[in-house]
Structure formats: structure tokens, C-alpha cells
Image: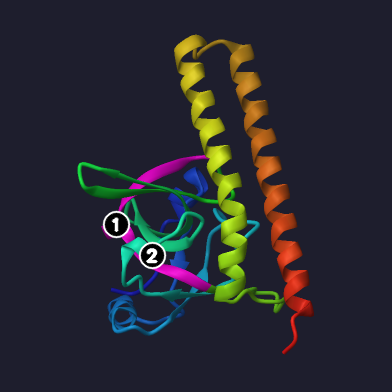
Amino acid sequence: MAAGIDCEKEDRATGRLDVTADGVLWDMWLESLARGARMPLRIAGKSMTPFVHVGDRVTVSRVIDTRSIRRGDVVLLRLHGCLVVHRIIARSTRRGEVRFRQKGDAGLESGAIAIGDIIGRVVRIEPADGGHGRDELSLRAINRTLWPLSRAIDLVYRTGRWAKRRTLAGDWYWADVVCARAKRMLRAAQERVIRRTSGASERLEGRRPT
């Protein structure tokens, strides 16, 4: 099966991120990844902007031990039949089963996934515009910084949705207006912090001796 499940419809509807594997057959891509090779992917969706943009090339590494998956890591995973690159924002264990919560940086919705849904970890990002890339070391630092933001926004958004369902009538016009404005504010704050954090990292990387 060729790489790159067509999720264009889902991407428009929910912000899911489609990826393509640079023309490599998907089965061969997965086999190479399983053998330990670091494999490239081309981003074709917008659910991780402004951290990852359409056309950026990312490198994916196999996850040997799931205990090594940290909160904040950007991973390649299967989500509702699509291949997406999203951020891990939480990890929990219920009845001995490890579960993760994932979210795209561009959106507010998050969802639970199992260990088996994770294909690999993103260890390098090369911008499509030829700008400064991010290696594994810088990604680790950025992800560690961005994780608390992603988690906090997720908790605020989910709490707001719960409060709306419990206390407000779903067809009340002003409740919908307030909720819509709050969502816009959360998205704007999220994007602003991600841009600033990524930009600061890139400036430091530019000063690092070669």
C-alpha cells in the first residue's frame, strides 16, 4: 500500500494531519523503520502549525521502549484511519494498560490513543522554505517547554466544554458566542507561545558553534 492515506476531507473537518512518505511504498517504509532506520515523511496538513508546516520534511525514529515516550514528544500515529503527526500531552495507566492523550498544536481537540497507535517519534524537522531545521536535541528542549502549555490549554478547553454541557443550554445564543470567543482566544494564545518558543530556539541554534 502506498504511503499517505487520503485524509483531505477529515483534515478540512477536524484538522487531522495527512502525511506522505516521499513516494516510498508504505510497507517498505514501515519495514525499514522497524529495522531501526530513520525514515523521512513530508507533511501535507495543517494540524501542527505553527510548529510544523505543510511541506516540511520530518524524520521519524522507531520507538523501541514505550516508556521512553515523554509528554511533549511529537509522534507519528494512526488516528481514525489516518496518519497524523501530533503531540503527546498526557500519559496514564488504567488497569495495567498505558494510554496517551494526543493533540495537534493548531487545534484544541485532544483524544486518547493506545500504545499500538504510535508508529514512531519525530526526531528532526526540516522546513520546506529552507530555513533552520531542528535536530533531536533542540526538539527535545522545545517539546519539554511546550508540553505544559499544551496540557494546560487542553484542560481549560475540556473543562469549558464540560461546564457548558452541565450549566448552559446548547441552543442559547450568547452561550455559544462566549464559547466561540473563548476558543479563539485559546487558539491565539497557543499559537503565540508556540511561535515565540520555536523562534527563541532557532535563534539559539543559530548561535551554536558548528
Q: Is residue 125 visible?
A: no
- Residue segment shown in magenta: 108-123
Identify which residue is drawn at 78% across, 70% down. Answer: 203
Q: Quadrant of the N terminus?
A: bottom left
Q: Is residue 68 left or right of residue 34?
A: right
Q: Residues within 10 Å of mark 1 (few under 14, many from 20)?
A: few
Query: Which circle's residue, 1 or 2, is located before the other in the chain?
Result: 2
Q: Quadrant of the C terminus?
A: bottom right
Q: Which of pointers 1 and 2 indicates the residue nearer the eye?
A: 2
Residue underneath mark 1: 115
Q: Quadrant of residue 121?
A: bottom left
What amino acid is labelled 2 in the image? Ser
Quote the CA–CA distance across marks 1 and 2. 12 Å
Q: Nearer the viewer, residue 23 or 56?
A: 56
Q: Nearer the viewer, residue 174 or 132?
A: 132
Residue underneath mark 2: 68
Q: Is residue 163 visible?
A: yes
Identify which residue is drawn at 68% across, 27% down. Answer: 181
What amino acid is labelled 1 in the image? Ile
